[in-house]
Amino acid sequence: MNIAQISNLSGRGANLLARMLEVAPLFQFAEFKPDPSTYVHIADKDSFSGSAARAEGGTLQRDAQVPNPESRNLALYGREISIDDVRKMDANVGVSPAGLRLFADRRLNGLGAKLAVEVQDEMLVGVDASNRMLGISYFVKDADATGQTPKLGFTADELAAMNVQVGLKLDTDANQKAFVELLEKEMANVPGANAILCNVNLGARLSTIARTIGAAGVTTNNFGQPVQTFNGVPIVKLPVSAIPQNESDGVNTDNTSLYIVRFAEELGVAFSTNSGFLFTDFEESEVGPQGIARLQFFLNLTVERQDALRRLSRIRL
């Protein structure tokens, strides 16, 4: 499901979510998977042997499968905003209800933008500790197996295989061509890839390269927004707070990463949630002279297959 489908909002809540999608584009592309507050994650790591071919009357190849479930919890993110009762009393001196609603809506839009960007960042950089969710960049680190932390049923070796150290500075024609070859190869290693996540700096460079080689395009996403593509796959340009420009390769500290993702509820990358975007409109407070509105997300990362994600790290501009 997309964020609007799983949130199932109407009225002010739906309008607020629409504003949030404008400032946090990852929410326009991510898939959200219904799961309870404590849920079981099972990576799809079935093992098979032999051949499916058989002789007439022969037996079928049978492989016993033993899942490796892992218990996970949703991470909780939320903010509240209050408006003092004195503002409501403005209705007594001629301020129209429409004016009061506009005042409240603007306060909500500001809070919604703050929370949306904050959670979008966490979807990439969350460290799976201190009440924070597991982010994509922490799930697959820029490291070999010794620097990976087994997560979601994947071993350190499996996680290391999901990271490709590019080691290129994209400031020459030769390096750009080498990068395109590597990018296309790794996109093929993510069957059904439907998003390329990068920061705005690399996104601009990638768009320039795509136009140069004839790989640029434009599509419309599920929310009716135009988005640039590379060989038909949407380029999702995120702020450097989500995908930094100061990653280290051991020598230089101006590296960044790109992520090739297959967002899917099943056998892909998704975010487990029991709420989507949860909105509680202004209500009277029992502990103070204010009306209080509450905005929340309960979510965490789910990755079910090794071929659902690739990180291309150590890219310089």
Image (cartoon, grey):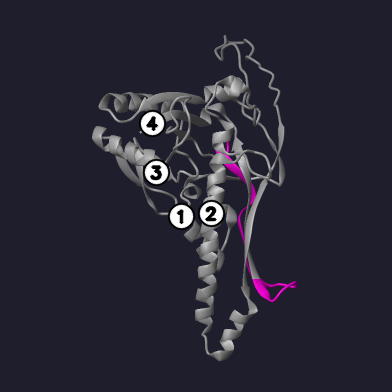
Above/below status of 147 relative to 281? above
Dot 1: what SS?
helix
Residue 65 badge: none
Q: Is residue 63 magenta?
A: no
The reply to whether the C-beta atoms of the residues labelled 1 and 3 are less than 8 Å apart is no
Question: What is the distance, in whole Å, between disc 2 and disc 4 at their CAs?
Answer: 28 Å
Question: What is the distance, in whole Å, between disc 1 and disc 2 at their CAs?
Answer: 7 Å
For the question of whether residue 165 can be seen, the reply is yes
The reply to whether the C-beta atoms of the residues labelled 1 and 2 are less than 8 Å apart is yes
Dot 3 amino acid type? Val
Dot 1 amino acid type? Val
Give the percent coordinates (x, y) of residue 86.
62, 81
Most foreground residue, 109 or 58: 109
Lateral position of residue 172 relative to residue 283, left or right: left
Question: What is the distance, in whole Å, between disc 1 and disc 3 at their CAs?
Answer: 13 Å
Q: In this figure, which residue is indicated by the disc labeled 2?
A: 116
Number of other residues with Cα within 10 Å of mark 1, as a class: few under 14, some 14 to 19, many 20 or more:
some
Q: In this figure, which residue is indicated by the disc labeled 4?
A: 316
Give the percent coordinates (x, y) of residue 7.
59, 56
Mark 4 vs 1, N-terminal side: 1
Dot 2: what SS?
helix
Q: In this figure, which residue is indicated by the disc labeled 1?
A: 23
Dot 2 amino acid type? Ala
**Residue, x 67% and y 72% (percent of image)?**
283
Q: In this figure, which residue is indicated by the disc labeled 3?
A: 200
Q: Residue furthest bottom?
A: 93
Give the percent coordinates (x, y) of residue 28.
47, 49
Dot 4: what SS?
strand
Mark 2 vs 4, N-terminal side: 2
